[in-house]
Structure formats: structure tokens, C-alpha cells
Amino acid sequence: MSSEPWDGIDVVDAHAHANRALVPRLLDTMTAENVSAAFLVAGGVVSPMELSHTIVTEGPGRDVDADNTDLLDAIRDEPSLAAFCFVNPHRAVGEADLRLIDECAGVKFAPGVHGIGHLDPRVQSYVDAAAERNLPVYSHCIGNGALSVEQYAQLARRNPEVTFILGHAGRGNFDLDAAQEIRAAENVLFETSGGFDFVIKNAVETLGAERVVFGSEFPIQHPRVELTKLCLAVAEADLQAVLGGNIRRATGTYEKGGNT
Ligand SMILES: [Zn+2]
């Protein structure tokens, strides 16, 4: 195997997608790229084309559930894999949702899929569930309205005891506003998938390396692409924190199979 700049670092993927069929390919890819663990979100809720369209047009989103149960079953015996519960804020959290969240390492919102604003009380009900379990919250923000980074930062300021993760470098490839918008909300981490390396450098300068986390967005993006980018953008002294240390700290209370 060729040597890579991230060899010898405990690399943890803070954000990838999978379903039962994709888990073997994900594990093979992690082995090939020296990724030691990954946090997964159930995939395939809407088609890639529909998701792309709702992200570009800011909605409207729809009422659809991810198959968290199937993903949890598929990774139950894989110690390197854990799930963020992909919740559906078209309803407030219910007993069935709480049972799923109890098995997960975090809570994931997808405004581009569901179209529910970050300050909606139904969203807060899931944040409350995360807070009670000391779990982080992840969201992929879009646009400038209710689904935006700015509103997500407001949600984070309302819930200072919860760690929030801003997915996909804010609004995607070239968003320098995002780091500014979350700067004062110190409980928000910045996940790097999809952002240009210039944006990642800026995030480290604006937020500090301890608030920046590697995510791959597998299978939409190959982990090697994101790891190569980060090793070009981040100082060597900060790589351990950005590539794995920060997300391990944010999910530190989660123990697979041991939190019920
Ligand atoms: Zn994603």
C-alpha cells in the first residue's frame, strides 16, 4: 500500500451514508484508506436527483422516513460503524423515535429532504432528546431562510449544552459566510465534506482546528478525495484533531450497545 499523509493518524469519518447493501463497500473503502471508524446516516431516502433539486431550489421537502432500523441492524456487529439517527421533523419526537435514538451516536437533520426549519418546535423536540442523551446533532443547511446556517446557529445558541455539527462546509463548495455565522456559537463544529480547500483553511483560521471535523459524504464522495484535500489544507500539527480527534470527543459518551 502506498504511503499517505494520513498514515499513522486515527482517522474517523464523521459523516458518511450507507444502507445494508453499501456497508461491505464502505468497510472495504475504509480499510483501503486507513479510516478506522465512521458515523453513518441511512441513505436512499430520496433519489440523488431529487435531493440535488431540493438543495438547489431550497425545497419544498417532504414527509418521508429513513430506514434507521435497517441500517442499525446492518452495522450491529461492526464495531467500527455507528449511526446518527436520521429523524423526520414532520412530526415531533415520539416513543418509536426515542427507541431508535437510544441506539444511535447522534441525531441527523436533512433540511434538503424534509424542508422543516431549524427553529421549528418539532426540531427542538429532537434536540431535547439529543441533549438528554448527551448526543451531538448534525444538519446539512441550505439557502438563506429557515433552513440556513444562520438559523442553525440560532438553534445552537438556544441549546448550548448540545454539540452541533454543521455539515458539508456550510452551503457547499465556496461558503466563507458559514464559518462567520457559527463563529460565536462555540458548540458548533464544522464538517468539511464538499468544501474547497481554501474554505477549509479559512474555517481552521476562523474557528480553530478543534472545531473542524473530517467527513467523507460517502458514497457521493470518495473518502480519499476528502482526506487528500484536508492534508493539503490543514497544518500537520492539526491533522490528528481534524481527521479524528474532534469527532471522537464530540461522540465520546457513545458506547455501541452500551447506552440502553
Ligand atoms: Zn450527507
Image (cartoon, rainbow, N blue to C red):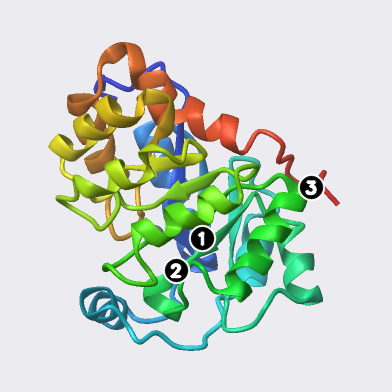
Q: Earlier in the sequence, mark 3 or mark 1?
A: 1
Say whether residue 145 is left or right of residue 12.
left
Q: Quadrant of the N terminus?
A: top left
Q: Identify the residue shown where x is 29% and y is 28%.
A: 204
The numbered mark at residue 110 is 2
Image coordinates of residue 170 in percent, x first then y, are 30, 52
Q: Identify the residue shown where x is 77% and y is 75%.
A: 96
Residue located beneath label 1 in the image: 41
Question: Distance from label 3 to label 1 (Cα)?
Answer: 17 Å
Q: Earlier in the sequence, mark 2 or mark 1?
A: 1
Which structural element holds mark 1?
A: strand
Respond yes or no on whether mark 1 lies under 8 Å from ligand 1: yes
Residue located beneath label 3 in the image: 257
Q: Can see residue 110?
A: yes
Q: Residues within 10 Å of mark 3 (few under 14, many from 20)?
A: few
The mark tally for this picture is 3
Q: Can see residue 228?
A: no
Image coordinates of residue 201 in percent, x first then y, are 20, 30
